[in-house]
Image (tube, rainbow, N blue to C red):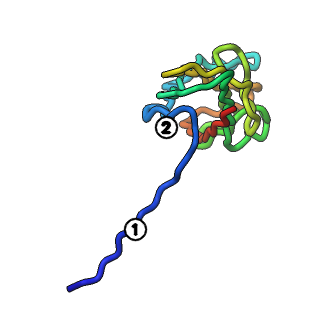
Amino acid sequence: MADTDLIFEGVLVNQPCRLSELSREQTLDFGEVNKRDFRDGGKSKSVHFDITLEDCVVSGNSVVALTFEGETDPVQEDMFALHGDSEGVAVAIRHVNGEIVKPGVETYPAALNEGTNKISWLAYLSGPNLNIIKEGSFNGYVVFTMRYD
């Protein structure tokens, strides 16, 4: 007869909502972005994404605030750094209401309703100086955390 171990692990939480599985890990594909889109400190077309909270049970004026964490771009300090062959561009995130997300800074709290809540965001590439933009592939990584009140 052999001895075996059975290990149990997990985390108990007390949160008013559950993060949708589709919101847990998302890939935003910018496709091909033309360098000429960045003339005069321009930006690329935006890519829309949602963070969906499900099964929300709220009391009173419940809100959620998000913090997006990632490497800050060394030139555009309010944006997130990208890696790869390209140079001179960074990624920015903004709420559909216009609020720009700064790395490591909590967003304005969003009101929660019973049931499902969808918080919509836009991401875009920003290149302040056309002369330093180098073509090539790029990628980046951002993690978000939520704080409920």
Which residue is located at x 71 percent, y 18 percent?
A: 42
- Residue at disc 2, secondary structure: helix
Which residue is located at x 63 percent, y 36 percent?
A: 146
Residue 5 figure quarter: bottom left
Q: Residue furthest front?
A: 59
Q: Amino acid at mark 2?
A: Arg
Q: At which x and y percent is residue 19? A: 50, 34
Q: Amino acid at mark 1?
A: Ile
Which residue is located at x 76 percent, y 26 percent?
A: 129
Q: Nearer the viewer, residue 58 or 124?
A: 58
Q: Nearer the viewer, residue 13 or 46?
A: 13
Q: At which x and y percent is residue 67? A: 69, 36
Q: Residue furthest bottom?
A: 1
Residue 7: which numbered mark, if any?
Answer: 1
Distance of mark 1 from mark 2, alpha carbons? 26 Å
Q: At which x and y percent is residue 23? A: 49, 32
The answer, for residue 89, to whether it is visible in the render is no
Q: Nearer the viewer, residue 74 or 59?
A: 59
Q: Nearer the viewer, mark 1 or mark 2?
A: 1
- Residue at disc 1, secondary structure: loop
Q: Which residue is mark 2?
A: 24
